[in-house]
Amino acid sequence: MKLISTTRRVLRGEVSPRLAALEAARRIRTLNERRRERAQLAELDLQPARLREEFARIRASDLLAHFRSRVKPKFLPGFQDFTRSAELQRKLSPQPTAQLIDQARRIVKEHCWPLLGFGEKCFGKEAIEWNRDPLSGFIWPLDYHADINLIRKDGSDARVVWELNRLSHFITLGRAYAITNDDSFSKEFFQQLKSWRLQNPTARGVNWNCAMEVALRAINLLAAFQVFLRAPEMDDLALKDFLKLFDQHGAHIQRNLEFSHIANSNHYLADVTGLLWLGVMLPELQSASEWRDFGRRELLREMDQQLLPDGADNEASTGYHRLKAEMFLYSFVLCHLNGIDIDEKYWGKLRAMIDYVRAYIRPDGYAPLLGDSDSGQLLPIVRRRGDDHSYLLAVGAAVFQEPRFKLGTHASGVPHLETTDNGAQHAGGVRTQEELLWILGEDGVRDYEALTLSAEPASQSFPDAGTYVLRDDDLYLLFSASESGIKGRGSHGHNDALSIEVSACDTAFIVDPGSYIYTSNLPERHLFRSTAYHSTVQVDGQEQNTTDEAMPFIIGNEARPRVLSWETSAEADTIVAEHYGYGRLSPPVTHRRTVRFDKGRRFWIIEDELTGAGIHEFSFRFHVAPGVEAKVRPDGTVELYDKISGARLLVSCQPREDGQPSSIEPILESQFSSHDYGQKEPSVSACWTTTASTPIGIEFRLIPISSEDNEEERRATVSEARP
């Protein structure tokens, strides 16, 4: 059975015989390499750092003096000159600074800190248990890393343990130490690092199972190393252990690269990013130049492979687009600082990635969570929930000197930085400011402040990604016509063909439900990526693309959405698309959806046409955002109401003129939404269900009404004209 499932995973999508043969040969080599690695476990754990000859022969005290005095290589400016960054942090962000220090004290006193969307977790009063699953209490064994079974079906989740062991909370301790110079933070850091090393021998256990996790941990450790290098606890022995740990991380990544001849993903990208950073920042190691050159070459190669021509990630996921954008953006900054050439072509691709983020960010400043999101971040200066992508725009604005990436303050208070009349900076968006400061330093903050605010973005299309944004002022509709990702080999796509997100009057009304969880709860994993959880049409209770609950990272590509037309102007936008996911039904059905946006009259019309033959059950759903009240009025209109803004969105179903179906009464289904991995909250879906013979057509009108609007006048305006 394992062989069958592995074959299904490897050969799904379009795979040529040549690539299949290359991949088979690679897998045989990997098996042989793992036999050698398994035989060398004890040696690998004891092996000291492999220093270049000129550093291996100098005294330990001189080696420490070398690291403390070196001016090259250069780390990210905020960490490089952390004394100045700490001073500016206190001045510009007093409240977040106080919160940061309080959080660091919780880490020291209670071993507690926030973990993904689960809120604050505590990891052992006396000693942290690095291999204990915070969800189930299961202690992952210290078996050879490749033997670890990640899907246990007992409530445990390797992704959650991995997040703990990325050690990003060391950045919290480091920043607090830089701000306060309090030795309790440095002592805690060195104690935790020692306990982690004792509990995680090289190549054993779940925390060495995935090279991506090793790479992300190495990058966080590099940031912590930069801050704690001058701490009293950093003596000759501590430096020796640190270099040993870095060398073991790099060597392990190199031995266990998650490369495939068929298709690579964010995993392999993270692997090579980790090698690049280790190679750049630790030239004292024997393998540094090899890691640096390989990492740079493969990073750019994967940029060519994993980015679509319009700048979007090829995994059909905005969550993983955020992670990849971080990898490229922060890595390009690091390379630039150290004189490592990145061709202008790749800077252009990076700019396109940031432009995609700017296009899909809603007026409230948050992102639609298309496809999967595990809330992962590279070097999380601030722990961001999964739908918070706006900080990338701030860093991108400063890097590219691009005013279009600078968010303004809409009625929702989207964060941005401001400058007072006397020139003193203050934090209109303090959480954004922290990334600017610690990634780009004082110059980055200054460059961002010098940019003028640009106008709100206009409607924009990303045909390669299948993402279309119909927007004007505070009105926003995102239309998804994406395939399942990675040329039909999707692992992070959802059954969301022709689905929509709608925001109006600075309120998100209709949203994608997110991902919630991966392997700890397979039924929930399956539910959140299902057709029934998305704002589209379901036929006969079937999925648009085939899925299997037992295979949480495999999804078919039967839908293959196709955009038939896209028109945009100052007055109106129209998108027409169809998908073929129900072609496997008997008899088959094709779904075509048309969205018309009248910008002047401020409303949308959605027309769904389902063609084919026979009688089918059709369910038309709109997934309502959490916190938005929904009710069905006596006339069948669904009213969505936001108590905070006082805004409403009216959704009415219009019968066809030929009378089929003459009317459908909506119901409100209880569902859930998730904006962060491991977090979910109640929401509802407005659903119109009918059993009818094909072809049928349904029209929906979506009318936003602000707290100042007169509803009767708004509805009259809409009824008078179509876009």
Image (cartoon, grey):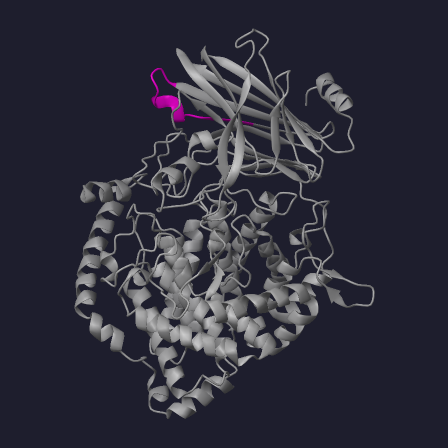
Q: Residue 512's x, y, as percent?
A: 52, 37
Front position in the image: 576 or 242 = 242
Front position in the image: 406 or 719 = 719
Front position in the image: 334 or 625 = 625
Q: Residue 720's x, y, as percent?
A: 74, 17
Judged left or right of residue 118, residue 653 is: right
Q: Is residue 655 visible?
A: yes
The image quadrant of residue 579 is top left
Q: Which residue is at 61% across, 70% downward?
A: 441
The image quadrant of residue 658 is top right
Does 625 lie within the magenta span?
A: no
Q: Which residue is at 24% across, 58% downward?
A: 146
Q: What range is drawn magenta here? A: 576-588
Count the numbered circles shown.
0
Judged left or right of residue 306, residue 474 is: right
Judged left or right of residue 116, residue 139 is: left
Please tell me whether residue 129 is drawn above or below residue 647 in the rendered image. below
